[in-house]
Amino acid sequence: MRPGAKKEGPTEDSDLTDPSEEGNPVDEGGSVEEDSVEDARPQEKVATVVRDTDIFASREVGEEYRGSVYRELAYDELEVAAESPSYPVPGRGGNFRTTDLPKVPKVSHIVGPSAIMLGASLGSGETMFWPTLVAQNGWGLYWAFWVGVITQFFINTELQRWTIATGESIFRAFDRIHGIWPWFFLVTGFFHLGWPGWAAGASEVLAVWTGIVPRSEWWIIGLVSMVFIWLTYQAGPVAYNIVENFQVVLMIIAVITASVLVVVVGSIGQLASVPAGAVNFGALPQDMDIAVFLGGLAYAGAGGYINLSQGVWAREKGYGMGTYQGRVKNPLRDAESEDVHGGFTFDPTEKNLRRWKAWWKVTQQEHFLSFVLGLLIVATIVMTIPAEYARGADVGAIDMWLNVVIPELGGVSATLLYAVLFIALFSTQYAIFESFVRNSVDILYEGYGRKAGWDLSRTFLGLMTIFTLWGIVVIGVQFQQPWILLVIGAAIAGVMMWPYNALTVILNTTRLPEHTQPKWGRVVAMWWATGFFGYFSILLIGDTLVSRVGLDAFLTTVNVVDSAIGGYALWVLFLVVQVYTMYRSFRGKVDASGTVENSDDARGFLA
């Protein structure tokens, strides 16, 4: 706790005046001083009339969320939640502490986590995998892109649900199910993001564009870019704020440049083919590279380990109960540490139920407007260019852009395309750097570091430095084709989404109380997501065993029935996972039904 901070703030029932109207100070990183904290301790159960002013934050308080918000409170003095249907099931992680949800800001005040996710997406599926797939196979595959984007909307927001309700990251939640899961995702996350393919791709584009180094020596730019990313984290006291601000600027530039580019190059006529491809459900070319396609599905959005950052970023931003959790600060800037506590929960009073409904609404709006619409519009525009100028080109994405498309354009068009490609790839590497380090630090800290007395911010700085050095080593090896790094990472991203989709829907239906659980429509959407990624993961696993290991017995086919004996075993595994996921989440929903009075008051926008 900061020196001079009070341990308790006024409860909202004792003082309904918004704290910000009294001029309470905000520190450099955007945290609200303790005497401005509301709802920091359990309130007495007294009858009150709940008004809109009790639910929604004032303009002044809302604007504090334009950065990130931390409200410090005396965690150990809060009441321990009883083990009852009104509160989350503790599992391995200990009981939760009760306090009220904070007031709800406007959606325009909380834009941030999804903007970072958009930045991670534009340089992956949206300028690499999907343009390549459309160039090679035509618009007939476009159905899979928009289905993948909508599917990831539900995945990402469900990953945020636990954080908004408890203030904990999704990794802490997975640990409550079983301690092996966070470590599993740490290992697979390393194989997904541990190869700096996006920095390599961005470096190759910049080398060709500027001629600052020969194309074959792109790795020199790659080394500089890794150091540059590390240095930018020293620009402020709060790591999250730096990343958000940097990514928002890059996204604005990329979107404007891409919009101008599609008009200049004259590919806008390709949009006429989009509707037919959008309804061409299930169409898959027989000779398609399943690894590239699964990578495209994973990267119809950010994908893999990056998606798991959505809840951690929501906590850092201050969504819901995440407001009460400390943020990663920069120890090199003499930034004072903030406490990351255990889990929180709230009593299902009318006020809290309405606040939950409002928090859930603005969270979904932020993700849909920033992430979904941004991807559908920008990515589709970018796909028109290779569809026009690289039809049938059977090369990797980077070679397609640099060797096929750009030579066809020349002049201003080529310059704009170079700029879009570089910004998209570099913004993705920046987000990947952030995502890998933040996720991994959270796993290490919660799994070991908290008990060992580690400082979260120093752990973040240490792993960030190690990851930078590792990236320098990998780039220094000078792989001949950066595209290979991207395909490897993308395929792993698609496979790892299968188990965490299943875990997330099970978690949110069996561990959360009725009023914060997803409704049936969302449960079905997560069943679909689990099956969707599971199906293509099995195809990829079978293809890898046959083509890379020579085990023909594990042949898997799109229609299933023509698979080999080992392939059938893989499909049985898929079926077992799907049935188990559906059964556990179905039972969780049924068992929770009717256990919390007035739980419908918390239902609302895409609940």
Image (cartoon, helix red, strand yellow):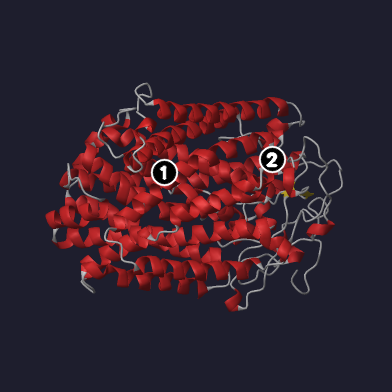
Of tags 2 and 1, the one toward the viewer is 1
Q: Position of residue 402 (x, y in %)?
A: 20, 57
Residue at horizontal 41 percent and vertical 73 percent from the top: 228
- Cβ atoms under marks 2 and 1 closer than 8 Å: no
- Numbered-mark total: 2
Residue at horizontal 17 percent and vertical 56 percent from the top: 403
User: Given the image, on which type of amino acid does mark 2 rest?
Assistant: Arg
Q: On the picture, is 363 further left or further right than 482? A: right
Q: Position of residue 9 (x, y in %)?
A: 79, 60
Mark 2 surroundings within 10 Å by alpha-carbon count, few (fewer than 14), some (14 through 19), many (20 or more): many
Residue at horizontal 36 percent and vertical 59 percent from the top: 198
Compared with residue 574, is residue 265 higher up or lower down, i.e. above or below? below
The residue under label 1 is 298
User: Given the image, on which type of amino acid does mark 1 rest?
Assistant: Ala
The residue under label 2 is 354
Residue 95 appears in the figure:
yes
